[in-house]
Image (cartoon, rainbow, N blue to C red):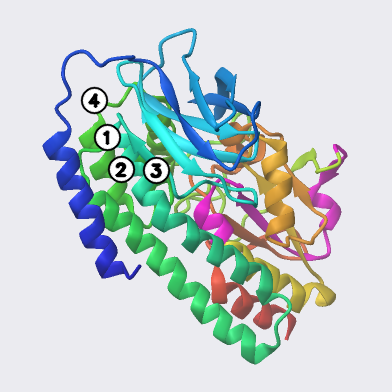
Amino acid sequence: MKFTTLKIFISAISFLTFVTGCAPPEVENAGLISGTFIGIDEGTPIMLRSFKNGSLIKVAQCVSGVDGTFSLTPEKPLRQGYHQLIINKRWPIVLITDSTEAPIVSASVPDDKGYITNSTITGSASSELLASYYKVLMPKQDSLLLIQNSIKNLNNEDKTVATQTLNRLIIELDNLSLEFIKSNPESPSTLAALENLSPEKYAVAYKSVLKTLSKTYADSHYFTMLKTKYEKSISQRKIPNQPPPKKKTSGKNSTYSVGDEAPDITMNNTDGETIRLSDLRGEVVLIDFWASWCGPCRRENPNLVRAYEKFHSKGFEVFSVSLDSNKDKWLNAIKKDGLVWDNHVSDLQGWRNEASSAYGISSIPHAILVGKDGVIIGTHIRGAALETELEKLFD
């Protein structure tokens, strides 16, 4: 589907949502979530999870009937917010609902693992609108990841073409999210589109959505998470129990800047072993703050992989600090994006990550380039700018 067609498509859905959104005071079977999943066996587990404090918490579970039908009702009434149906721990569908609605979901389950993008949802206007967004977004995201994974195996000419395609996809994804927000300003489904955008680059969109939904959706956990993300991007955090930096910095998103010595980071790697940033003294090191759930981070990863492959033999290392809270998702992202370097650390505390707090990181992705002597020589370095800087250093 072309983008111009998508714009009309989303606008039409928004209009229908507006026209039909006035539900009667009472909904039959309120709180019940039911439907049919084609392509699963009888007895397949279906779980309902609610988004809370950065994690998904199980709130109800059932098994499918002989024809793929299911129905479940949480023991406690659902709070207004984002929730997830996950089939056999493999195929998730996101819902925006609460105990006043009775959404009915139907979909064909694909052969491979991943989000279901062909679902039909009734009984929940916000969930239906969100499904229309994911239906267009997810295939593009999958194409992006395929290109990211293939670039490292291409020759220089093919890499150039693939990189150009990758950059066009990134712009297209950003525009998709922005247009969805513009077309559906009152819907809580815009929070999902907002999460795919960088709060630094798209601060206006963040401010607009958060302001619009503040009166109706501020008590939801998903809203709180994105509000915190936005606020971190516009304010600096001081290092606890440490002296102030050597000098005032004019840059955003970091307490330290060029000329400051990078504080040491001591944290566990993927095997649970403690490693230190200072162990890499004598090498040129890029400290990369990222997370598996961060779309801009994942889109930046091919640039890091390319730079690592080109300059590692000359003395370049990457020290990746993940702001994940789920270890499996962290490890899967490392594998899927081909992040082959050894120095991956995380304390699995999400935004409360000790290293990111100490460095005053307010939004990700964020990269800090450190010289062989441990002194910062560059910040906010992304894409082609990283390779340009490394070429100057090593050539």
The secondary structure type at the circle numbered 2 is: helix
| First in residue order: circle 3 vs circle 2 | 2
**Is the residue under label 1 in contact with that under label 2 (CB below 8 Å)?**
yes
> Label 3, on which residue?
192
Q: Inspect the magenta stretch and tell me whether residue 280 lies in it.
A: yes
Which percent across, then down, holds residue 10? 25, 54
| First in residue order: circle 1 vs circle 3 | 1
> Label 2, on which residue?
129
Q: Is residue 199 visible?
A: no
- 165 to the left or right of 95: right
Amino acid at circle 4:
Thr
Residue at (23% x, 36% y) in the render: 211
Mark 3 vs mark 2: in front: 2
Q: Nearer the viewer, residue 196 or 343?
A: 196
Between the C-alphas of marks 1 and 3, the distance is: 15 Å
The 10 Å Cα crowd at callout 4, few under 14, some 14 to 19, many 20 or more, is: few
The secondary structure type at the circle numbered 3 is: helix
Amino acid at circle 2:
Leu
Which percent across, then down, holds residue 12? 18, 52
Residue at (54% x, 54% y) in the render: 365
The image quarter in which residue 313 lies: bottom right
Q: Quadrant of the C terminus?
A: bottom right
Amino acid at circle 3:
Ala
> Label 4, on which residue?
216
Which percent across, then down, holds residue 133? 36, 50
Between the C-alphas of marks 2 and 1, the distance is: 6 Å
What is the count of numbered marks? Answer: 4
Q: Nearer the viewer, residue 156 or 92?
A: 92
> Label 1, on which residue?
125
Between the C-alphas of marks 1 and 4, the distance is: 15 Å
Q: Nearer the viewer, residue 313 or 220?
A: 220
Mark 1 vs mark 4: in front: 1
